[in-house]
Amino acid sequence: MLRARWGVTEADPSVRFGERAALLRSGRDKENAVADDAQPLLYTRGLVKSFKKRTVVRDVCIELQAGEIVGLLGPNGAGKTTTFGMVVGLLRPDSGQIFFLGKNVTRLPMYKRARAGMAYLSQDPSVFRQLTVRQNLMAILQYQKMTHAERRRRADVLLEEMNIAHLAGSPAYTLSGGERRRTEIARALVTDPKIFLLDEPFAGIDPIAVADLQETVAALKRKGIGVLITDHNVRDTLEIIDRAYILSEGQVIVSGSPKDIAGDPLARKIFLGEKFRMDFEDIAQP
């Protein structure tokens, strides 16, 4: 866990946010100096964002490797949504940088980030409601340099991978929340993205659909795709991620594995609550 690894120990849970964030950054800088060859798929450096003279994100640094699922979590108003928006390209940082596949994409518009391999799924439904599930995929596939037969074969593969082949002829407006999410992911996979940015993927779906979607996200990991998730459903997110960053007052205050996060005194005080419990032994690795 970053706290113990970089000098913030169990004995000093009262360290101020700014001091803790500085320790996290200094430790990360030291690690980068000796591990430049292990460059992350996506990383940010010193992101800052203010609205009407109020700073909502302060010097945020996060990293994501290929084939890794990372959560961006925190209480309401912590700055996680703003940070996520800057990574996606919906917002431009006041200062700081965003790197993807080794290139600085800080000033790239959203569509160019998508072309580079960054897939974004918003919280709001994005399917074409009047089209069938297959037609939703074909609407994107028509822009790929393929023959019609190749497009249909590619659609068939994605429908099978996302376990929605039986829904191929169903209009999108008839889909459940989980089915819609899998359709959106299948459609995004058309362009062979290197990373998925999932905004509130577990919102508005029932427990069975949550489990299905967790397996879908795990399948992305197995394909070597990096996944960054921000969601208010903490348990559902902790069950599937490899690591998490906890933000509070615009800063990363804790970072580590789900088990580390759940046992961290500051994370429990600021975000999870003292009564929070999870049995990690029963959670299968994605």
Image: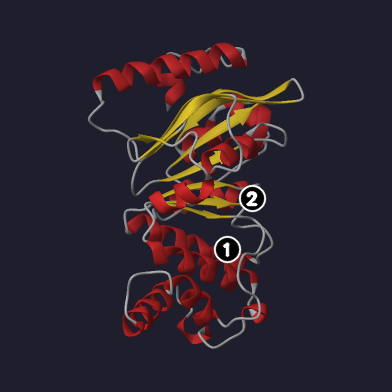
Callout 2: helix, strand or loop? loop
Vertical order, 218 against 182 (above or below): above
x then y, percent, for residue 43: 42, 33
Question: Front-most of 208 and 85?
Answer: 85
Report how many numbered discs are placed on residues in the image.
2
Q: Residue at label 2?
A: 233
Find residue 222 and report its image quarter: bottom left
Residue 165 location, x and y as percent? 45, 83
Q: Give percent across and percent down for residue 44.
A: 46, 30
Residue 210, numbered label: 1
Nearer-the-camera pick, 49 or 175 = 49
Marks 2/1 in contact by CB < 8 Å: the verdict is yes
Task: Specify which label sits upstream in the sequence, 2 or 1.
Answer: 1
Residue at image position (22%, 30%) is 37
State left or right for residue 7 relative to residue 66.
right
The amino acid on which the numbered mark 1 sits, given as a three-letter code, is Val
Q: Nearer the viewer, residue 168 or 214?
A: 168
Q: Residue at x 53, y 76 (%)?
A: 136
